[in-house]
Amino acid sequence: MRGRILTVALAVVLAVVALRLRSQNSGASGSTGTSPSLPQIRAEQTVTGSLTSTDSLYPDTTYYKAYQFIPTLGREVTIDLSSSDFDPVLIVNGGGLAQPIVDDNGGPGCAARISQAFSGRGPYRILVNTTTSPHRQTGRFTLAIKAGSQHVKDRSENNCSPGRVSTSSASGNTSHSIEVGQTRQGSLTRNDVPLDSDSTYAQAWTIQGRAGQTITIDLESDAFDAFLFLRGPGIHGGRDFQDDDSGGNCNARLTATFPQNGEYEIDVNTAVGEYYVTGPFTLRVTSGSKQKSVAPCHRNSQ
């Protein structure tokens, strides 16, 4: 079994964040007063929209669209911003915050996520924004607020490759999800996240976990030597949460127990030595544990 941890360098946007922090007292940030002109969004609501060239501009020349949110005092919420057309940045300001909260890649793939309780009564402004590169990105997005806390990725967990975000709906950052008891067919393609450290592609699938719940993940493919990772709250890397050939015949099988409640990420990947290989696969998640297979892997590198 290969002992490595999936790590992709996070694009540093300190200059962008600095501009946004300075803008908190500007018209972009707004005051703490309710603005009837802003669309409202509530907990347990999902809205879709589009950033366009007619939207407001930050000093860093990125477009943004604003929504207004009034939280329940002290209740944790998770705000997610995703897009297949641009690399999203999520900003929350107002409501007595000392400075805006900014997130780039805290959610699955390249999605942005902020998860916390708000101590003020608001209202807060949620800004749908983008990274500075590519220049002046536009396109469709989904903004959702859910009750409760969800895992926010840190730098070591980042699996976003911002340069691969396109202005087409055929972007490789399509959201994938699976539930316990389901079998899904997929395909690893050149639009997925390239891991330059070992010359492979990775594709993320989200799954909801319950603390103490044991599952078995099977990744099978006739096109490549399967490798998978499980990441999320309470997981800090290590061989217990990754697998190469335990499914037999070059397939991956991982039995793991969720440390906490929350959203986890299964990363479909390939073995080291197969240079950016792609192809169809089957991903299956079952309840409980399964024995490891002893069938050897004899696949030739492709």
Image: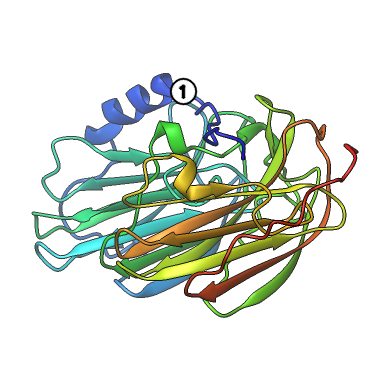
**Above or below: residue 154 compared with residue 10:** below
Colour logic: rainbow
Quarter of the rendering containing residue 17? top left
**Above or below: residue 137 compared with residue 215:** above
Where in the figure is residue 135, as x and y percent of width and height? 63, 30
Classify mark 1: helix, strand or loop: loop
Q: Is residue 99 visible?
A: yes
> Furthest residue to the front?
294
Q: Quadrant of the N terminus?
A: top right
Where in the figure is residue 252, as x and y percent of width and height? 67, 55
Where in the figure is residue 198, as x and y percent of width and height? 69, 27
The amino acid type of the residue labelled 1 equals Val
**Above or below: residue 22 compared with residue 99:** above
Where in the figure is residue 183, as x and y percent of width and height? 67, 75
Q: Residue 4 or 119: which is nearer the viewer? A: 4
Can you identify the residue that label 1 sits on?
12
